[in-house]
Image (cartoon, rainbow, N blue to C red):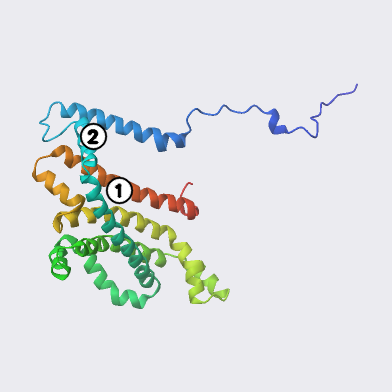
Amino acid sequence: MSIKVSQIPVNQDLASTMPRPPKPAISQRSWTIVVAPLAVIAIIAGFWEIAASFVNPVLIPSPQRVASDFGALFKAGTAQAALAISIRELYIGLFIGLAAGILLGMLIGRYSMAEGILGPFINSANATPLNVLIPLLILWVGISSKARILFVILITFFPVLLNTAGGLRNVSKGYVEVGKTMGLSERQLVRKVILPASVPYILAGVRIGVALAVIGMIVGEMEVSNVGLGYLLNFYGEGFQTGRLLALVFLASLIGVFNVTMVRLIQRRFFRWTIVGR
């Protein structure tokens, strides 16, 4: 009695013979990135519309009113003029604050002597509410864009500095020792070992810094300006023009979202290995 054994042809791909699961209509990633936020926005807008119908419009204007005022601000050119000034001051202060925070953070994080000398002053300055420095900034540079840029620099500088210094201090000593045994110089050690290991901490500080920079821009213009988005927020708030006030709040929040999104895109493009669960 002979038993016949069926064979699969050698040139036949076994995987091709297996049934493939159907592709989901909407992937979980698409739901998380697109659908879920839109659903939340729609729910908030619905509750907002309902609340606006029961409350004085001076307190809570309807979404349609805010959208109408938003368009009117751009049609009149008011928003563009204020936005141009605010964006200029924001990004000048932001880039200076980021650069200074990263460089000084590297110095403090790498060299204990620098931390011992500068640490107490940095901790004291970081614990000081920045608003109390506004009169001093006015005294130093006057009521000008310089004062507002300095305020953005200060509010951006500290979180970036502290995260960068913390990142360098948390680099595994084993990595450093391996680099030294390979004969790396101090510069090579920082560039090839310490900085790459610190990138997640630095990027976390940058994300905080770019978000706080928008707050610094608005607060600085509210206190030391007769131009820009912050000034208009004060102007419309004092005039009880709540629709235009909320339209500008929405515009300022868009700037913050744009900044944080750009940092995330840069991280995903150039530092993808730092993303957890990528």
Task: Tell me the residue at 12%/47% (across/down).
Answer: 235
Q: Amino acid at mark 1?
A: Ile
Q: Which residue is mark 2?
A: 67
Q: State the residue lying farthest toward the top.
A: 1
Residue 246 in picture, x, y percent from top left: 19, 40
Q: Nearer the viewer, mark 2 or mark 1?
A: 2
Q: Residues within 10 Å of mark 1 (few under 14, many from 20)?
A: some
Residue 169 is at least partly visible in this image:
yes
Q: With 17 as the anchor, is 146 left or right in this view? A: left
* Mark found first going from the N terminus, 2 or 1: 2
Task: Tell me the residue at 31%/33% (across/down).
Answer: 40
Task: Tell me the residue at 17%/42% (across/down).
Answer: 245
Q: Which residue is mark 1?
A: 255
Can you say whether 248 is above or below 14 in the image? below
Q: Quadrant of residue 184?
A: bottom right
Question: 117 and 205: which one is in front?
Answer: 205
Q: State the residue lying farthest toward the front.
A: 76
> How many discs mark residues in the rendered view?
2
Distance between the Cα atoms at labels 2 and 1? Answer: 17 Å
Residue 151 in picture, x, y percent from top left: 22, 62
Q: On the rendered image, what quadrant is the N terminus found in?
A: top right
Can you say whether 113 is above or below 148 in the image? below
Residue 16 in picture, x, y percent from top left: 69, 31
Q: With 23 as the anchor, is 165 left or right in this view? A: left
Q: Quadrant of residue 75?
A: top left
Secondary structure beneath dot 1 equals helix
Secondary structure beneath dot 2 equals helix
Q: Amino acid at mark 2?
A: Ala
Residue 104 in picture, x, y percent from top left: 34, 70
